Image (tube, helix red, strand yellow):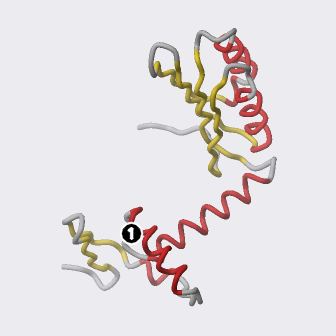
């Protein structure tokens, strides 16, 4: 039996029913004026992405905009990944990348190396720290001669101590 604070929602496309606490008691409703053409494009986009409601898509857009503002502050805590695509036989790219990683070991939590084919490798580094330091680390890595493509992806947050029971 559902309590008064629970709401039954049905996701017909996915074929399942979810019972959740009614979070609507904790939200503020707003009105948005938007041109019909822009709304149609937005609806098409969120449908492709799998959103069931405009509200959740708008909340995600707002969260992402706020996170991007945090990244602009060099002293903010961030976590993210640095993706590096390179040809492993070109020059001393592997050695230079390893040298930079050792110099910044306190900012690198993990790394994964993938052999894409006989020539190319993908290196994925999980990084954390102050936004400015993480950006500089990414710039140092991405500017190594032989890197075909490098990309930093960040989100607000930090890696702290955590206990497992």
Q: Residue at x 40, y 68 (%)?
A: 51
Please provide percent x and percent y for residue 131.
75, 44
Image quadrant in which you'd find residue 106: top right
Q: Nearer the viewer, residue 39 or 18?
A: 39
Place of residue 91 in the rendered image (x, y in percent of width and height, measured from the top left): 69, 9
Choose between 110 and 123: the one closer to the eye: 123
| Picture residue at 52% right of the left edge, 82% below the top | 37
In the image, taking residue 49 as reference, residue 121 lies left or right, namely right
**Residue 29 percent across, percent down from the top left:** 53, 87
Query: Image quadrant of residue 66?
Result: bottom right
Q: Quadrant of the C terminus?
A: top left
Q: Nearer the viewer, residue 163 or 105?
A: 105
Left/right of residue 136 with respect to residue 62 in the rendered view: right
**The N terminus lies in which quarter of the figure?**
bottom left
For residue 155, above or below residue 128: below
- Give the residue displayed 68% in from the left and 18% down from the top: 97
Secondary structure of residue under mark 1: helix
Residue 62 image position (x, y, % from top left): 61, 69
């Amino acid at each position: 039996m559902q309590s008064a604070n629970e709401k039954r929602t049905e996701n017909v496309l996915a074929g399942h029913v979810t019972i959740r606490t009614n979070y609507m008691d904790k939200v503020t409703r707003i009105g948005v004026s938007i041109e019909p053409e822009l709304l149609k494009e937005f609806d098409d986009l969120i449908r492709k992405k799998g959103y069931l409601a405009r509200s959740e898509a708008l909340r995600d857009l707002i969260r992402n905009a706020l996170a991007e503002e945090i990244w602009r502050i060099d002293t903010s805590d961030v976590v993210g990944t640095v993706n590096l695509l390179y040809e492993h036989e070109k020059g001393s790219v592997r050695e230079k990348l390893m040298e930079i990683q050792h110099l910044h070991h306190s900012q690198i939590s993990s790394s994964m190396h993938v052999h894409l084919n006989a020539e190319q490798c993908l290196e994925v580094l999980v990084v954390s720290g102050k936004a400015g330091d993480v950006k500089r680390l990414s710039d140092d890595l991405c500017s190594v001669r032989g890197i075909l493509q490098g990309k930093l992806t960040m989100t607000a947050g930090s890696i702290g101590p955590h206990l497992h029971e």
